[in-house]
Image: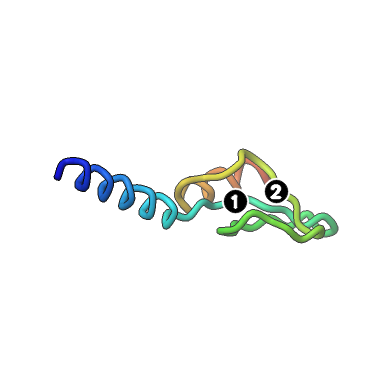
Amino acid sequence: MIKIICAASAGLALLSSAALADFYVVQEKSTKECKIVETRPTETTWIQVGPLAFKTRDEAEKQIKVICKK
């Protein structure tokens, strides 16, 4: 019984951690415009700037002011 509860808890933790979104600060190469996105950039026109990812949008918004100075 304990094994089943542990397995169910581990599965639930795995699913809930995958559901949490990461936020990335990206910059367009030509215009140098920055924005926050929820998926890592795969297009060649946008590059990721700053740390790998932010756990909350608020963290990303605070850092975009530091990373992307106009």
Task: Name the residue that disc number 1 marks.
Answer: 24
- 59 with respect to 45 (left or right): left
Seen at 40% across and 49% down, the residue is: 17
Seen at 76% across and 57% down, the residue is: 46
Q: Are marks 1 and 2 in contact (CB under 8 Å)?
A: yes
- 50 with respect to 2 (left or right): right
Q: Quadrant of residue 19?
A: bottom left
Residue 58: percent from the left, percent from the top? Answer: 46, 50
The local secondary structure at tag 1 comes to strand
Residue nearest the viewer, comparing 24 with 60: 24
Seen at 75% across and 51% down, the residue is: 47
Seen at 33% across and 50% down, the residue is: 11
- Which amino acid, mark 1? Tyr
Above-or-below relation of 59 to 36: above
Task: Name the residue that disc number 2 marks.
Answer: 48
Residue count near mark 2 (Cα–Cα under 10 Å), binned few <14, some 14–19, many ≥20: some
**Residue lying furthest right in this view?**
30
The local secondary structure at tag 2 comes to strand
Residue 68: percent from the left, percent from the top? Answer: 68, 46
- Figure disc tally: 2
Residue 30: percent from the left, percent from the top? Answer: 85, 58
- Which quadrant does the N terminus fall into? top left
Residue 48: percent from the left, percent from the top? Answer: 70, 48
Residue nearest the viewer, comparing 14 with 41: 14
Residue nearest the viewer, comparing 54 with 19: 19
What's the CA distance linking mark 1 and mark 2? 7 Å
Residue nearest the viewer, comparing 55 with 8: 8
- Which amino acid, mark 2? Gln
